[in-house]
Every structure is written in structure tokens, then in C-alpha cells.
Amino acid sequence: MMTPNERMTSRLGLWLWRFWAMTLKELIQLGRDGLLVFAIAYLFLFDTYMAGNVGMNLNNAVVVVHDADQSAASRELIYRFQPPYFKQGGEVADVRTGQRLLDTGGALVVLDIPPRFEHDLLTGRPTAVQVQVDAANTVLGFLAASYSSQIIGQYGFDQALARLGQSASALENVPIVQSEHRVWYNPNQKDAWFMPLSELLVVITIMSIMLPAAAAVREKERGTIEQLLVTPLSSLQILLPKVVAMTLVILLGTAASLGLVLHGAFDFPMKGSLTLFFTVTALYAFTTAGLGLYIATIARNLAQAALLAILVLMPMIFLSGAWTPPEAMPAGLRQAMYLSPLYHFIEMGYGILLKGAGLEVLWDSLLGLTLLGAGIFGFGVHRFRRQFG
Amino acid sequence: MGKTALVSDAAPVVRVEGLRKRYRKQTAVDGVSLAVQPGEIYGLIGPDGAGKSSLMKAVAGVLAFEGGRIEVFDQRIDSEAAAEKVKGRIGFMPQGLGLNLYPELSVEENIDFFAELREVPQAMLATRKARLLAMTRLDRFRDRPMKQLSGGMKQKLGLVCTLIHEPELIVLDEPTTGVDPVSRRDFWAILTQLLRERGVTALVSTAYLDEAERFARLALLHGGRVLAEGPPQAILNAAPGTLVELAAPAQMEALERLKPHFPDIEAVGGRIRVFVPDGAHAAALERVHALLDGLEVHETSASPPTLEDAFIILLRREQAVEEEQRTVARRTDDPPPADGVAIEARGLTRDFDHFRAVDQVSFSVRQGEIFGLLGANGAGKTTVIKMLTGILPPTGGAGAVAGADMRHAGWAIKERIGYVSQAFSLYQDMTVRENLRLFARIYGVTRQHLDARIRRVVELTGIGKVCDELVARLPMGIRQRLALACALVHGPRVLFLDEPTSGVDPIGRRRFWEILVHLARVDGVAILLTTHYMSEAEHCDRLALMHAGQLIADDTPLALKDALQREAGQVLDIAAAPVLPALQALEAAGMGQPALFGRRLHVLAQDVDATRARIRTLLEGKGVTVHDITLKMPSLEDVFVHRILARERAEAGR
Ligand SMILES: Nc1ncnc2c1ncn2[C@@H]1O[C@H](COP(=O)(O)OP(=O)(O)OP(=O)(O)O)[C@@H](O)[C@H]1O
Ligand SMILES: [Mg+2]
């Protein structure tokens, strides 16, 4: 028999003691699941690292030239296609060879300079160069086309100035509009910052749905829930430790990813308050877990849970702006974005880490995140209680 | 087995030579050699973790092994491809409740699926299915999804699915674990019939040693090696001795006097069973009487030991039986003065959709009492327990547990009860100690007392050696002890045990019962349990028998036996050879519900002498040798079988 003094007496103490026991149990179980540990490490470290390397930059795009003029002017134009955006791929004898290179992927851009190019320039006759771009990858093709036209336009502009007999230093006397871009927050427009950060935020989302769902479904699948149900644990005492344990794991993964990948490999600036960022992440992971719990009430086994999670994740990510910028969305969908917690999370993540913004700016996102999160979590817990309460 | 004559000198169906199998650091099978002849039932027995399951899996071609060789149907099993060649001729059922089945499919769909897989012709399917479903009493539940079946029903369905293609070699790992006594008898009848009619061969393991007495040959495995092999009689001969049974009012005193001389001693209900290592009955009785000189002793009897006794003695010789820390003598004869009702059920009812699983069940259990809930598979035992423990809300009725009302004080009840579920439900990816810690903390055992508390239950259940092992690696019997330890870690006043000993070996079961008796008698814990081992039911203070959701009897074991004698007559125990034709002859003649018990037959008779004479003439007329016919005190199995069959007959007649 157990004597009374062997048992906890204070109610709060008992609650915390149970909470601790269950959280520890979740962590032990997670640690024993080698495959899961591997998946977590892979997503947080390797996947975000990969995302930083496969950015959508025009990077050394191969340019081949058909130079029918072979003049100083044509060479100067060709010379302007330079790294990092372009790379010289040499000359071809005729345009058809160039096209074949486009077809086979040997080149992204074919620059065709007509005969008498220099002559026409010098005599002031209008002339044209042809640029052919492989637009199979729309974004890259678009970038290549616009950079090329920019280079050629600038070249034409310089030539026109020269013909007017004016040097570049006399530029201020010419009435022109200078379009001056200033790219803020990501001055070099490095995708190596944008991509891994959005990837990290997506990984956090996946984990905060999948991990609690897996932990809860496993209890159902293996029948261990039955033993818990005869103990004096409330359904909240069964659920909360799962969510808390998984949130801890997610925070740990986030810290590792930020430190090792974003900061370590890509020199991410980390402008804002890290405390604020981790607090927001914890809030986000915790509340999004509600979706995982809801999935666990429907799914009968892990496979089903994984499928359901994908079903939930796809629209969430699609509406978040991580893959498609909000500006590219039709108006209706743009409104719907406010319903994706990931949208608010990304706003805050970028805001804090890239812009160094604080709560005074981000309060609306935080409000959105909190309201959505509370709703989702409440719903998940409610469903779980209905099933096992 | 009367059919041993059938066993020819033909090439064996299964030949195992020097088989070795290791799991990481643990050796599971350590040089086993055996041969299974065509048309025989070859049995594997042995304590938990002896290597039975590994051996059977290797023979079925689903487990790779390191050393030795296995031949099945003259095909050497040394690769997946080789195993594939003979798989069509083998039917294998792994251990565990319905592990090979599909939960979402109905009973019938599961069977059809397996039939299709095994390419059973449509014409045969219908007859075989009908026969197997009738034999397992599952025909009423054809459309029920497998996941809604009771534990034993799942087991039986697994069996049906394994037998549906009538394989030439049947490999069954504890097929009757969790199956009720009536269905178990039918199962062996069907298997014997398949053997006789189709020349099927079977390799079967079992934890019921009374069943093992019917096997043609057996191997007793221990620590991955064969300890003894041969027909049941050969194993019995390896442990010669006499079993003395007696009743002594001063039971504790009697036990204390006998224990130092005869370590194999057991208190069953009010009686003492003691094994005397001496062949001669008279001499054995004399020695026991001499030791008990001066004590009142009655109803003494001497009989040859059962296979279970031999099993324990052979293992004790191997020092495989841990010496019990506590002696059975701690048992006091009477339950402690009742300090109130521990469990009370009043008209408990539970419906699943339109099916009434539990119908108006009422009973009460006092503190310190061991209460056994018996019944066929699907009778509703687990459902009753689930309602009392608060897992399942009742459709109707009320109840009180540990002094708290079920409806309003669910939380208070949960604090005071311990529960071992029918399907193992602890964390397999954690160690034994981690599981114990978890549950101790959940029940609020404080940090200072945690280790001491855990040490106590570990000692009590004898799982000290495996404390740091992952539960997934433990054999079934040890897992069950862990489940009990977890249920005891908070010192509950009331214990609910749903088939706690299913699949546990005889040694583990004896030990289990010592713990339970100790808990009830010394600590005054009320215990409600279910079991399909009728010999265990003898330990209970009171028994309730359920049938189709209703309680059909509720009394002490003794009163139930008396009632049987009053209603149906005395039990005649017939030793005859060959036994199966004898059974058929008695059945054909419609003589007092004959039933096979081990290798003997039991018949109920009102007029003992006349019946005895009639049986003799009948059997001898059929060419059966009758060794002897004795009057026997009815066992609980007699009671169970009679009651259930009587009910079924009444329902069929209605
Ligand atoms: N969730 C459920 N839905 C529908 N029917 C169910 C459900 N659970 C149990 N049953 C049915 O209730 C009946 C009683 O089941 P229960 O598990 O209580 O039997 P049992 O007496 O414990 O049997 P066993 O000896 O095989 O363990 C069975 O017919 C079973 O199929
Ligand atoms: Mg049951």
C-alpha cells in the first residue's frame, strides 16, 4: 500500500509533476525514433541549406554571340555581358547553331549582331540587335531578357551621348530621367537570404503540425491511450505535454538552423531581437499544433495523419506568400491570405530578422497570429477531448 | 494421441538441425534440432523467451537465421526465394491478437481476402468458411469489422484465415491464447480432424499445458535449447513423482511444514497441491502425512503429476525458476474482515449501435476479495471492465468503485484503481524503468519516494533483471508482469486485470497468482480479473459467469461445482485408448456430454454405477481399451463447458 506521505499533496505541484513526467516521456519517445530524428535534422539543417543554394538568381547565364559585324562597337556590346549575371559562351558561326544551343540547354541567351552594326551606329541610322532567350524557366528567362535589354538600352544610350559629342561627365545637361532603384533590407538582393528563411518558416510549420499529430496518433495506433485514460490525467494533461515537448524540439531546430545555416553559411544579418523572434516562433508552433491534434482525431494511423497533414499544409503555404508573392495573387486570394497563420508568421519573421522591426510595427501581424492560433488550438483540443475525454 | 500410429517413417515435413538465431546481443535459439513427421501435431512448450516464436518464424520462412539448417518439404530454407517456394503450402499464424488481419474489413471480408490471396476455389470457399465460422462461433458476426471484435474473437478469426486454404503444414504460435475453453476444445477437434482427413501436419506452441498432453510429440525449450523431447509421456517420465492434494484447515501451518521438503507446492483455493518426487503413491502419501502429523487433514488424494508439474520440475532442475522471495505461507486462510464493498455494478448495460454487448449486469466485490469474471469470447467481460474503469461510458445502469460513484466521481475512482488491459498497452519504445517512472509520477508519487516505490513493485513482480531493457524486446510473460507492476505502482485499492496471464508460461502464472493472493490477503486489495485458464479460476474467491452480455452465474467455485453435480450429475473421468474414437462413440451414443480433457474423457452421469458399466460395454464393443473410469470432483472447466453448452442448446432450441 502506498502511504499518504508518498503522494504529492499540493494540487499545483501534482499538476506540474504530471506535466513534467509526460513531457519527458514525449522527449524520450521522440529520441528513440531514429527516423524521425533524422527527418527533423534533415529539414532544419540540410533542407534550409539547399534552399539557399538554389535561389532564383540569374547566375552566370551563358551567352553565345553571332557577331556578323566583327567590329569594335559589336565587341564593346558583347563585353558588357558580364558575370555575375552572364558568362561568355563564345561565338557561333550562324544563328541556327545558336538556336540549337538554346534547345539543348547549352546557352540561355543568343545575341545576334547584324552586319554593318558599327557602320549604322556611326552614321546615325537606326539599327537593331536580336536577343533570343530560353524562357523554359519563366523566371530565369524573364530575368535574362530584362537584364539584356537593360544592357543593350544602356549601350544605345551611351552611344547616343557619344554621337552628340558629349562626354559622360556632361550628363547633367541632358534632360533624362534616371530611374534609381534602391533595394532595401536585402541590398544585394541575395536570394541566399530570402529562400532559406522562407524555407525555415515552412519547415517550422510542417513540424508543428506533424510532430504533435504523430505523437497523438501513435498512442491511438498502439493502444497506449487506453492505459492513459484510466489514469487520473485530464485530456489537457495528455495533450499539453505533447505540444510543449514538440515546440521545444522545434525551437531547438530553429536555433540550430538560424545559427548554423542562415548565419553560419549565408551570413544572414539577424537585425532584430532574437528573443522576440523565438517568442513568436514558440507561439506559432504551439498554436499550429492544434491542427496536428485535430488531424490525430481523424486519422487512424501515421500514414493517414501524414496525408491529412499535407492536405492542410498545401493551402497554408500557398496562401502564405512563401512561394508566390502576395502582389502576384488575384484580389480574392489576397484577402484569403490573412487566414493563413503562416502568412502572419512570415511577415513577422522577415520583419524581425531582416528589417529589425519591433512590436510597434508588427503588432497587427502578432494580433492576427494570436487570434488565428488561439482559434486553431482551441478547436484541436476540443476535438481531441470529444474523442477521448 | 491415439493417432500416433499414423506417424510413419516417411521423410519428415520439417527438419531443423542446429538452428541458431541471435538478436543483437541476445541468443534466442541456440542449436535446436528436431523433426516433424507428416500427419502429427508437434508441440513446442517452454517458458517465456525460450525461443519458441523465433523457431516457428524461421520454419515459416519469415525470419533469417545465422546458423544451422531448416528443411521444409525437402526444400532447404536458406534464402527468401527458397522460402517463397514452399510458402504456398504453409499456413503461419504469428503470436498476438489478430496481428495478420485488417481492422477495417469485416470478418467475412478478411476471410475472403485471405482465400483470394491463397487462390482458394470459389466452390470450396463457401463450405470451408461455413465450417470454420461455425467452429469458432463467429458466424453471427460475419459483417462486424475486425476492429470491433473482442480479443479472443480476433484470435479466432486469425485462425480461420490461416486455415482457409487448408495448408499442408500449419505453423501456429500460441493459437489458443485468449480463446475461451469451449472454443478451444472445438479448435483442437477441428485441427485433429484436418490431420486425420487431409494428412495435415502441424507445428504448434501453447501456454496451456493441458492441451499439450494431446500432442503426438513435444519439445520443451529453454534458453534457446531443447531440454526434453518426445511424446508427452516421455516428458512426464523425466520428472517422476506423485502429486498429493489435500485440504487442511490450518493451511498456513501446513504449507510452512511442507515447503522446506517439497519446494513445488501451491495453495489453490482452500486446497494444497504438493509434488512429491517419488513414484509410488502410497509412499508419497505417507511422507506427507508424517510431516503434517498432528494437523487436521482431509480429502487427501494422490495422482500422477500433470504435464504442467513436470514442466516446472524440469525447469527447476535447470534453475530456471527464480526462488520466490515471499513464501506462499503468507497466505492466511480467510480474507481479511471485509471493510466494505470495493466494486459494485448495478444493472450495467452497454450498446454498440444496435448490438447489446452488456445487458443488465449486477454484482459486487468486497475489499480483499478476488473476483473472477468468466465467459466465452465476446461475452462482454472487457466491456464491463472498461465501463467500471471509466474508459467507456455505460448506456445504462450505475456503479461504484473504491467508494466513489461512477457517474459523478470518475476522477476519484481513477486515483484509486490499477488496470491491466487485455491488449498490452504500455510504451514499447521505452525501458521498463522509464515506464514505471512515468506511471509513478502520473499518480503523484513524490520524488523522494519514487525509487523506493518502484523497487518495491519490481521486487514484487520479479522483473529486476530487465529494468533497463526496452519493453519491445521483452517476451510476452515478462511484459505482463511489467503491466502488473505499472498498475501497482501507486498502491491502488482496487485492481482490474483483463486476462493478465494470457500467454504467460506456467511458472510466470504461478508467480503472478502468488502476487495476487498476497495483494488480496495481506494488503486487502480487491481484484477483479478475467481469465480463460480454468485452473486459475480456482484461485478466485468468487466467480461470475457471463454469456452473451448477461450474468448467468455468480458464486464461489465450490458452490458452482456443487450446483453442477446437482443439476447434471457426477463427473466420470475415463482413461481410454485410443481416445478419439472413444469420444466419437460416446458422442454418437449421446452419453452425458462427453468432453476431452487432456488425454482423458469426462462424462456427466446421474447414476454413476450404471453409466460406468454402460460406457465400458459401449467402448469395448468399439475396440477401445478402457483403462479405468473414476469418479472425479468436477473442475471449473467442467462447470464452464457445461453451463455454456447448456445455454447454447437452450438458445438453439428456442
Ligand atoms: N467498439 C465496439 N463496437 C462494436 N462492438 C463492439 C465494440 N467493442 C466490443 N464490441 C462487441 O461487444 C461484444 C463484447 O466484447 P468484449 O470485448 O467485452 O468481450 P470479452 O468478453 O472481453 O471477450 P474476450 O474473452 O474475447 O476478451 C463483442 O461481441 C464485441 O464484438
Ligand atoms: Mg476481453
Image: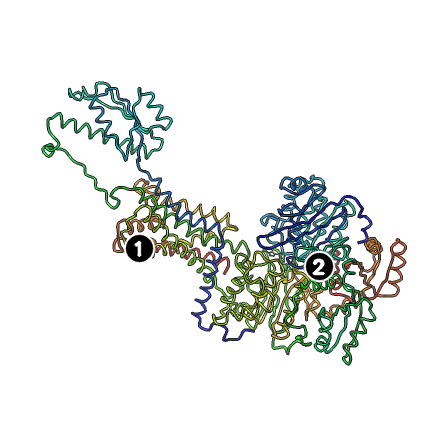
> Residue B253, image x and y in percent?
71, 78
Vertical order, A137 against B142 (above or below) = above
Write down the residue under mark 2.
Answer: B208
From the image, tell me which residue sits under label 1: A274
Q: Dot 1 falls on which chain? A: A
Q: Which mark is residue A142?
A: none
Q: Name the residue furthest bottom.
A: B294
The subunit carrying tag 2 is: B
On the question of residue B396 being in view, the answer is no
Q: What residue type is labelled 2?
A: Tyr
At numbered mark 1, what does the secondary structure look like: helix, strand or loop? helix
Q: Where is residue B152 in the image (x, y as percent from the top left)?
A: 65, 56
Q: Distance between the residues labelled 1 and 2?
A: 65 Å
Relative height, residue B652 to residue B10 (above, below): below
- Give the residue type at disc 1: Leu
Can residue B341 be spotted in the picture? yes
Residue B339 appears left or right of A115: right
Task: Classify 10 Å Cα crowding around label 1: few (below 14), some (14-19), many (20 and above).
Answer: some
Considering depth in this image, is B228 or A93 the residue closer to the camera? B228
* Ligand 1 closer than 8 Å to label 2 CB: no
Whole-percent x, y for residue B147 in the image: 59, 52
Q: Is residue A86 above or below residue B286?
A: above
Number of numbered callouts drawn: 2
Q: Quadrant of ligand 2?
A: bottom right
Q: Is residue A238 above or below residue A347?
A: below
